[in-house]
Image (spheres, coloured by chain):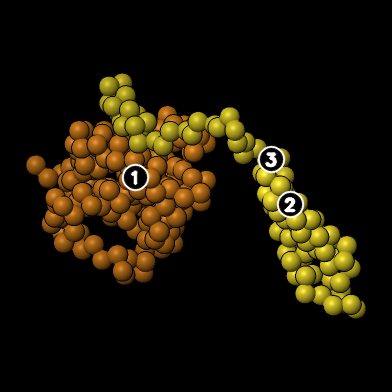
Amino acid sequence: MNPFHTQFHTRAHQTGLTDAERSRVHAALTRAMVPEPIPSPFFSTSFFFSRALIAATLLIVITGGTTYAAEGALPGDLLYPIKIGVAEPISGTRLVLQRLKYLLERES
Amino acid sequence: MKDRNRLFDAAFADHADELFRHAFFRLSDRERAVDMVQECFLRAYTYAKDDDIRDMRAFLYRTLRHLIIDEYRKKKSYSLDAILENDDIHADALLPQDDTNTIEAATVRLDGEQALEKVSELPPDYGEVLLLRFVDGLTPREIAERIDVSENLVSVRIHRALKALRTVLETP
């Protein structure tokens, strides 16, 4: 490094922000920073929880969709066993409940 | 958000002084340089994407560079540009690939401290490469990546900047 480089570099590195200037600029940056969100006690976004939530949602969508699709199935169709085993018992339970509700209303 | 805030806090601690130096010696105006460092961090915080944050120092320098260019556009015009025939388009053809020796020879005769005070009087492109080379210690290749020009053009600019400095220093 020749004298020019040394002088140039040394002189430059003697220059910097004063404490007051540093505080002022840092304060402006801190004010601009978006505050860290306060974690909700009712909802956790932990890795495990978010994965479990996604899995549960997928399960509901897939089973619900399959059962709904099975309602129109005929004997021999792929979804017919689901219609017999799942969709119709659910639908039957709903009818029984409606009947019970009707009878209770008529009694009262 | 917490990580981003922490990254910018760390970047401020690590780079605020060097960014200030760069702005100060290019503008020769302390108050304006402080404002510019502040604006640089605020803009970087607002606009930085993940890729930018991975090389925070380079991103901060790029942001500061744009601010300084805006500042020059607002304020100054350079007769030195004309005097030194700042014809960068053809500059690649004028010098050999490695002109390190020429630059070394040119710098030996200059007083570094005096020269530093005069950087702000140079055309913006020249001041920029001088500070990146001799204050921040970047190689011509690193400077070329930083300011998005060819390595050879950086060498040409450094060479010409030193010539311009000599002219400025010798002018009474």
Residue corresponding to mark 2: A103
Earlier residue among tags 3 and 2: 3
Q: Are marks 2 and 1 on the same chain?
A: no
Placement of B89 over or under A108, stated as above or below: below
User: Residue B46 at x, y = what percent?
Assistant: 38, 45
Alpha carbons under labels 3 and 2: distance apart = 44 Å
Residue that appears at 71% across and 47% down: A107
Binning the other alpha carbons within 10 Å of mark 1 as few (below 14), some (14 to 19) or many (20 upward) gives: some
User: Mark 1: which amino acid?
Assistant: Arg
Mark carried by residue B43? 1
User: Residue B116 at x, y = what percent?
Assistant: 26, 37
Q: Nearer the viewer, mark 3 or mark 2?
A: 2
Residue that appears at 67% across and 45% down: A108
Binning the other alpha carbons within 10 Å of mark 2 as few (below 14), some (14 to 19) or many (20 upward) gives: few
Q: Please tell me in which quadrant of the rendered image residue B61 appears.
A: top left
Relative depth, front residue between B145 and A48: A48
Chain ID, mark 3: A
Is any atom of residue A4 visible in this view?
Answer: no
Residue that appears at 43% across and 33% down: A35
Alpha carbons under labels 2 and 1: distance apart = 71 Å
Q: How many marks?
A: 3
Relative depth, front residue between A15 and B79: A15
